[in-house]
Image (tube, rainbow, N blue to C red):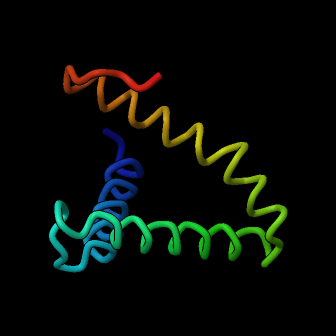
């Protein structure tokens, strides 16, 4: 794994820890997902210059596919069922 990839993974885990923030992942999953939605929407708006149309396009044209790819990659490495 490259240094850049390691740093990206560390950032992802730090963001995950901040979003979960001590909540129980089983009993508080709905509120954790609401916080995740809020964070993603905020980041997309920041990146797209506060333009909600561009932010929605980035979500639909890039982010969803990227997440699906990461989930499939995880499944292939762990032997779990693939999404798709």
Image-based side of 23 in relation to 35, left or right: left
Residue pictured at 39% horizontal, 35% vertical:
71
Image quarter for residue 66? top right
Which percent across, then down, holds residue 19? 33, 74
Which percent across, then down, holds residue 60? 70, 47
Residue pictured at 49% horizontal, 42% vertical:
67
Residue pictured at 42% horizontal, 74% vertical:
35
Which percent across, then down, holds residue 36? 44, 67
Give the quarter of the figure containing the N terminus: top left
Q: Nearer the viewer, residue 9 or 36?
A: 36
Image-based side of 65 in relation to 71, left or right: right
Residue pictured at 15% horizontal, 70% vertical:
24
Image quarter for residue 61? top right
Q: Is residue 59 above or below residue 47?
A: above
Which percent across, then down, holds residue 75? 29, 27
Image-based side of 52 in relation to 10, left or right: right
Image quarter for residue 81? top left
Q: Is residue 37 above or below residue 72?
A: below
């Amino acid at each position: 794994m490259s240094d850049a990839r390691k740093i990206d993974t560390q950032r992802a885990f730090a963001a995950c820890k901040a979003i979960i923030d001590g909540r129980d992942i089983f009993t508080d999953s709905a509120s954790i997902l609401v916080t995740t939605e809020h964070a993603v929407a905020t980041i997309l708006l920041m990146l797209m210059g506060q333009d909600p149309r561009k932010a929605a396009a980035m979500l639909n044209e890039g982010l969803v596919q990227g997440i699906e790819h990461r989930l499939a990659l995880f499944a292939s490495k762990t032997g779990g069922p693939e999404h798709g």
